[in-house]
Image (tube, rainbow, N blue to C red):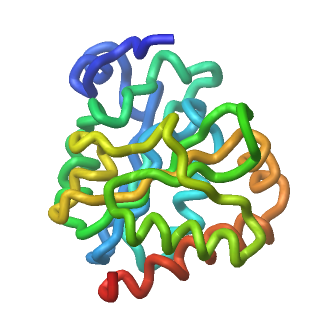
Amino acid sequence: MADRYQSFKELAADAQLDTDYCIRASDRGSEVVILAPHGGWIEPMTSEIADAIAGTDLSFYAFEALRNGSHGDFHITSHRFDEPTAVELVGRSRFAIAIHGRGNEGTDAVWLGGRATLLRDAVGASLRDAGFEAEINNKLPGLHKANICNRTHSGEGVQLELPRRLRDLLAKDHELLQSFGEAVRNSVLPSSAI
């Protein structure tokens, strides 16, 4: 299904902030921003997962649809995602890690993508060490230069695509959600070495 809107400007002309959608952002001055550009009802649980990864010290951003059934209405594909707060926050960051949801096709693995290959591989290794499946994928690779995760000042970021089954598990199990968040954080916090 094609996106209804090709830009945030188009979406904002039709939808109302804090009624149809909301934007949550915390600039914590970190080198890494964790974001969920398709949060709320667009790709359920992605905002909560991004928030768990960000904790209280990594910068955080979420664009969230507030109405059930909003996937098609509020989804702006990642290489067209141009909401100004996100673009500004990501542009000030060295790396961005974007949390996305996907269907249950294929394995239950987190699909790893993005242009920051060293960080992507570190995230994958840390997730596997914590007991999660993670694999590089070619279906949703996150390599487009305009992808919101790659609009950092380094031109690199990481895209994580979580299957619905895993997101549902994380929603039901707070300890598992924290474990997932810590696994990604463990690969991010030493980012100055990457």
The location of residue 29, given as percent across then percent down, is: 26, 76
- Compared across the picture, whether 18 is left or right of 10 comes to right
Q: Nearer the viewer, residue 106 or 164?
A: 106
Quadrant of the image containing the C terminus: bottom left
The location of residue 17, given as percent across then percent down, is: 37, 31
- Determine the image quadrant of residue 30: bottom left
Asked if 14 appears above or below 127 in the picture, the reply is above
Residue 189 appears in the figure: yes
Asked if 52 appears above or below 99 in the picture, the reply is below
- Determine the image quadrant of residue 42: top right
- Compared across the picture, whether 41 is left or right of 153 comes to right
The location of residue 74, given as percent across then percent down, is: 45, 23
Q: Nearer the viewer, residue 19 or 34?
A: 34
Count the marks. Answer: 0
> Residue at left 81%, top 52%?
169
> Residue at left 63%, top 47%?
162
Asked if 96 appears above or below 68 in the picture, the reply is below
Residue 89 appears in the figure: no
> Residue at left 60%, top 57%?
49
Asked if 41 appears above or below 94 in the picture, the reply is above
